[in-house]
Amino acid sequence: MFLLSILAAAIAPGLSLLAYFYLKDRYEAEPVHTVIRMFIMGVLLVFPTMVLQRAFVIGFGENPILYSFVYSSLLEEFLKWFILFFLIYKHQDFDEPYDGIVYATAVSLGFATMENVMYALLFGPSVSSLVMRALLPVSGHALFGVMMGYHMGKAKFRGGTSERGELIYSLCLPVIYHGVFDYIILDAKPYWMWLMIPLMLFLWRISMARVNRANDRSPLRAVIREEEIKIS
């Protein structure tokens, strides 16, 4: 019973955040089965990521900057980006800019949820530590996913040279913010909270602005307004 409680506490934050961003889609909800599939892909990404991270540590050492910006942020965000680009970017269900945010947060939160479950099983954490993980690593992955998905959505619906630029942004921005996030935790231990709180507030602010912008760019917005005018 205790194990089930711990697992539920580890899984709940990721699913709650996924539901939150899923319901933020104002115009056309994505097929649940496709979102779940991307969430599961995020879960499965944890295992090759752990193997590669261990290989990097053995080969190049545990330097905090390398670990934060290469072994962790670059590797994790690239693998998420790779899955999104090759499995969902050309998919027929990806038919408006906000869909990028839905699918990117699904992959990111699948990854974060599996990490949380493994942490709970290995370390048997207290409720307070699980709450802290929900507020920081799990939320962090969700916000990195918002950035990735926002620019991937812009890339798909802009085309041309802008598409390449937005695809680069969709990878580079999450890598940078994720690296800063990890570096604060690893190397700013005496005062890390004083840096982390402003960072998380900033990430939430820009992420919610991007959520609203992505919805505003939906081609379905004009269609729905026309239908509302006809009805009225």
Image (cartoon, helix red, strand yellow):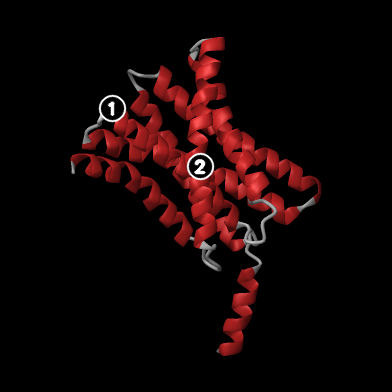
Q: Quadrant of the N terminus?
A: top left
Image point 24% across, 44% down: which residue?
4
- 59 shown above or below 232: above
Relative to 170, is 35 on the left or the right? left
Residue type at numbered disc 1: Phe
Rendering coords of residue 94 (x, y %): 63, 58
Front in this rendered view, residue 216 or 55: 55
Residue ID for mark 2: 42
- At mark 1, the secondary structure is helix
Circle 2 Cα neighbour tier, 10 Å, few/some/many (<14 / 14–19 / ≥20): many
Residue that extends furthest to the right in the rendered view of this protein: 160
The residue identified by callout 1 is 123
Q: Return the x and y of residue 2 as percentages of the image width and height.
A: 19, 40
Residue 99 visible to the viewer: yes
- Name the kind of residue labelled 2 in the image: Gly
Q: Is residue 163 above or below residue 140?
A: below
Query: Which residue occupies 49% across, 32% down?
Result: 47
